Image: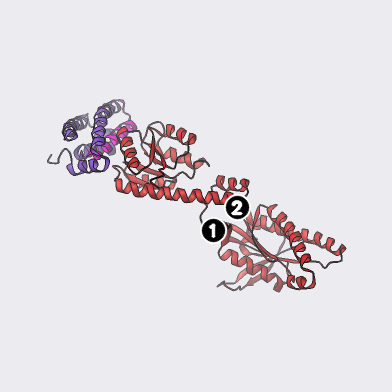
Chain colours: A purple, B red
């Protein structure tokens, strides 16, 4: 994985258009909401609920791309489009969770910068 | 627009998206309220007046597609502009939204510059639409204006299937010269009162009066189940009323009047034309020209009511007619079949 965790130009542009203070709050909101989306992915996978699974993946993709978390966005997208089958035994969910941790750490840094 | 500030509703189940969209719109100088699913959004829309809706598609409880369907079915909300903002990929989703009446589909993450352009364009459209509605209210009775809005009539120009009628008084110029001016005005007023009764009795709308001639439309602006049949029946009523009017005139020692009527059916361009102070609903197109030619042709053919092939076909034998063969009219490349409607004596 040579792709950056956060695409800096995207994040900076977001700060420029929406305001750095607002983006700091928006990052906080994302960090509050995302764990719920990851949990929803696991729950929907266990329950075999494809629509709920796709919706959670869809939300995660959309948010990740908003902040320039392109790798996370791409992983979430493959789950959205591939639905339950794309989750495998859950390894794909582990990969998404790992990438989320990396993205979250990077966003925390940028948020304070 | 920015200084007055429009009122927008932002609907998204995802909090990050909701906050960011609202922020971008507020930076444009507008006010926003937020809803986190379609059901809540519809309740808010029905309770208050909004200028624009920013709508997500993938939502629990009620998704964006369902919201669009409900808006289309609600006369009070049908004209509310909607911009869909979604991260759903695939052209079919875009097409579905547009078909359900959305103004536009913006893929998330939404580019703020694009959002600004779309929001401004939609608000401008809404402003024009509101202006047109006010215009209709000024020139139509409130019942008609309401009907127009409820029937979903597009206030700008559009193509409609309609039947057009032209009618005038035979030998009117000679009549005018033989009588006093006040008598002519009195005659015209009595004549128009009768013709309006006959036409509106069959759901037609008189949209032009020129001297002794008039133009009426059936099927627009209000839809009529069978415009061709309605027009022909109105024409027969007009003839009958003229006969009765002539009995009155004869008793007063005045000469009878006779009218000619031309009717054609087909596609017309319909819409309001004019200025803010004076506007009229009008129809333009081949069908209108043909109806006028048929009316003029009644003199040549020695008939009272002439109709075109499309009107004749739509009658389906429910009125007695006589085929007069095909006729070549000015402005028409091909010969047009002409039928005379039998007038009971």
**How many neighbours does mark 1 have within 10 angstroms: few (below 14), some (14-19), or many (20 or more)?**
few
Q: Chain of mark 1?
A: B
Reply yes or no: does residue A53 show up in magenta: yes
Does residue B167 appear in the picture of this structure? no
The image position of residue B344, as x and y in percent, is 78, 61
Quadrant of the drawing holding the C terminus of chain B: bottom right
Q: Secondary structure at mark 2?
A: helix
Q: Nearer the viewer, residue B90 or B175?
A: B175
Reply yes or no: does residue B329 show up in magenta: no
Where is residue A108, by image quadrant?
Answer: top left
Query: Does A1 appear above or below B179?
Result: above
C-alpha gap between disc 1 and disc 2: 11 Å
Magenta stretch bounds:
A47-67
**How many neighbours does mark 2 have within 10 angstroms: few (below 14), some (14-19), or many (20 or more)?**
some
Q: Nearer the viewer, residue B337 or A77?
A: A77
Residue drawn 66% across the image and 52% down it = B203
Q: Is residue B202 left or right of residue B154?
A: right
- Which residue is most to the front? B3
Residue drawn 17% across the image and 39% down it = A6
The image position of residue B40, as x and y in percent, is 43, 31
Q: Is residue B224 left or right of residue A93?
A: right
Query: Does B219 appear above or below A11?
Result: below
Where is residue B6, by image quadrant?
Answer: top left
The image position of residue B329, as x and y in percent, is 61, 73
Residue carrying label 2:
B139
Residue carrying label 1:
B275
Residue drawn 30% across the image and 45% down it = B112
Query: Does B139 appear above or below A107?
Result: below
- Which residue is most to the left? A2
In the rendered structure, which disc, 1 or 2, sits on the residue that comes first in sequence? 2
Where is residue B267, by image quadrant?
Answer: bottom right
């Amino acid at each position: 994985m040579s792709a950056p965790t956060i695409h800096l130009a995207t994040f900076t542009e977001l700060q420029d258009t929406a305001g750095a203070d607002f983006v700091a709050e928006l990052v906080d909101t994302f960090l509050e909401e995302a764990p719920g989306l990851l949990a929803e992915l696991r729950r929907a996978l266990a329950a075999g609920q494809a629509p709920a699974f796709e919706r959670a993946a869809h939300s995660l993709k959309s948010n990740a791309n908003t902040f320039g978390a392109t790798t996370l966005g791409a992983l979430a997208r493959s789950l959205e489009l591939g639905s339950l089958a794309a989750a495998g035994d859950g390894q794909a969910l582990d990969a998404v969770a790992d990438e989320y941790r990396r993205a979250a750490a990077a966003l925390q840094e940028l948020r304070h910068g | 627009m920015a200084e007055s500030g429009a009122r927008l509703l932002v609907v998204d189940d995802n909090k990050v998206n909701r906050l960011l969209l609202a922020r971008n719109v507020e930076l444009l100088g507008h006010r926003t309220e937020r809803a986190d699913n379609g059901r809540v959004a519809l309740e808010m829309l029905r309770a208050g007046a909004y200028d624009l809706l920013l709508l997500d598609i993938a939502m629990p409880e009620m998704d964006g597609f369902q919201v669009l369907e409900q808006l289309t079915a609600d006369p009070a909300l049908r004209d509310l502009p909607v911009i869909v903002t979604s991260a759903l990929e695939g052209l079919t989703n875009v097409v579905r939204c547009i078909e359900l009446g959305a103004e536009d589909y913006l893929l998330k993450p939404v580019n703020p510059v694009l959002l600004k352009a779309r929001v401004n364009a939609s608000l401008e459209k809404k402003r024009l639409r509101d202006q047109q509605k006010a215009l209709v209210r000024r020139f139509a009775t409130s019942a008609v204006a309401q009907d127009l809005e409820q029937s979903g009539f597009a206030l700008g120009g559009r193509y409609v299937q309609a039947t057009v009628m032209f009618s005038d008084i035979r030998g009117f110029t000679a009549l005018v010269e033989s009588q006093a001016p006040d008598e002519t005005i009195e005659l015209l007023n009595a004549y128009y009162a009768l013709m309006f009764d006959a036409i509106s009795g069959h759901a037609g709308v008189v949209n032009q009066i020129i001297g002794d001639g008039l133009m009426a439309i059936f099927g627009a602006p209000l839809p009529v189940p069978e415009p061709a049949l309605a027009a022909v029946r109105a024409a027969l009523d007009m003839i009958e009323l003229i006969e009765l009017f002539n009995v009155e005139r004869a008793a007063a020692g005045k000469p009878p009047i006779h009218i000619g009527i031309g009717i054609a059916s087909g596609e017309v361009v319909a819409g309001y034309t004019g200025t803010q102070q004076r506007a009229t609903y009008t129809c333009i197109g081949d069908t209108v020209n043909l109806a006028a030619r048929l009316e003029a042709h009644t003199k040549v053919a020695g008939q009272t009511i002439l109709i075109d092939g499309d009107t004749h076909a739509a009658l389906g034998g429910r009125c007695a007619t006589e085929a007069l063969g095909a006729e070549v009219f000015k402005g028409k490349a091909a010969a047009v079949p002409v039928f005379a409607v039998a007038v009971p004596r």
